[in-house]
Image (cartoon, rainbow, N blue to C red):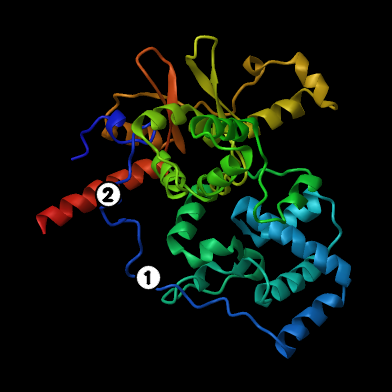
Amino acid sequence: MFSQKLSKIIDIQHIFLYNKNIKDPCQKENKKMSEFPQRLKGEPLQKLYSKALETLSEEQIGYYKKLFYAFANLYGIIPIRKIYELLTDNYGMEISEKSFLDLCEYFRYEQESYFYIFGKEEYYQEDTSPASEPMDRLLAFDSFVEFDDAYELVLSLKEGKPWYVPPIEELEKYEDDLYFEKTKAFDSVIGFLKDEFKLDFIDSESKIYDAFFTLKLEDHNFNDFLDELQQSGLDITFERVQKLAPYYTELNNNTRMQANSGYTALPVLDADGSYVGVVTEGDLLWALKSICVMDMRQTEAHFIRDILPRRVIHPVKVDTRVEDLVSVAAEQNFVPVIDDKNAFIGIVTRSRILRYCQEQYFARTQKIS
């Protein structure tokens, strides 16, 4: 049924995966989203605020709210227990568990915020699971609560992945929901748009913002990225798609994604462009810890080739058939793709493979019926 070559279906370079004329089989037709969480106002909300004030000052509550904004923007979805761990263990903040939970209860019902706090069982109306303990609830970016397909998708993609922990000064910047780290890859895309479409810098930057946030917020493909650019008014021809593909690959590999809990991953190539392996930021952090680097300038004495990845990420050839690809994806979250000369082409995620198989199954059953 799925006996097709990888090069025909995955979103590497200019190859498109998702057929927008077919209804998304991942859409939950039989589940109704809960109206939770209901926001409070007036006296009920004031009582929650007063309880938080018993152990925290107004300034502390305001600061913690900024950090909750930052956690929502950086991670998309994060367990409340993980937030407490980060605040106390990683950032050294002195707040008791009771005070923290009182704070969460206030934030959970407050009107003015772009995040929600809820238990997994509260998400769908028909869910009869036992109520979550307060520490087992989730903090979620508001868009994930408003669009259930994004919520379930990102939640599944984050499973088992480590958490990127930025310095507190960097974390605070994520209070702004439009903030992101502008990398060289981002600047390169800006430069491409500026030169290709004869735009000034401001126009180039504005054109890419929506496309960039599509890339950042959840699982995505090149087609989604191009759709956003086209909707901004750019004429995306086939020739331009081919030119843009390498820039997209770099941007994709250097963007902190909520589905990756803030982490990125980079393929390692040799001088000829052949695929060597994948080094994640987690690998880099472990390497820095092992060599006891106290000053980032000391890292100049070390090489990527000296870093031992904690896990081998196996690539596949571009002409690999889907049924063979599935077995590889069962063991790793993403699969690097190479050509016959071992040159790196791109990466296809496990979720993208599953969605393709679901689409094919859905289309097949539609024909039969």
Q: Secondary structure at mark 1?
A: loop
Specify which label sits upstream in the sequence, 1 or 2.
1
- Picture coordinates of residue 260, whole percent (x, y): 56, 44
Q: For the point 43% across and 50% down, which residue is it?
A: 231
Q: How far apart are the alpha carbons under marks 1 and 2?
A: 20 Å
Q: Nearer the viewer, residue 331 or 258?
A: 258
State whether residue 322 is above or below residue 140: above
Q: Position of residue 132 (x, y in %)?
A: 58, 70
State the residue at coordinates (17%, 50%): 364
Residue, x 46% and y 64% (percent of image)?
Answer: 147
Q: Which residue is mark 2?
A: 359
Q: Which mark is residue 31?
A: 1
Query: In the drawing, does residue 92 fall left or right of residue 174?
Result: right
Residue 202 vertical placement versus 367 (above, below): above
Q: Residue furthest bottom?
A: 43
Q: Is residue 70 above or below residue 255?
A: below
Kindly identify the residue that appears in the image at 32 percent across and 45 percent down. 18
The quadrant of the image that shows the N terminus is top left
The percent coordinates of residue 144 (x first, y second) are 52, 61
- Count of all numbered marks drawn on residues in the image: 2
Q: Amino acid at mark 2?
A: Glu
In the shown orientation, is residue 153 left or right of residue 204? left
Locate residue 114: give its quadrant: bottom right
Horizontal arrangement in the rendering, residue 172 relative to residue 164 (left or right): right
The amino acid type found where label 1 is placed reads Lys
Indicate whether 149 appears above or below 200.
below
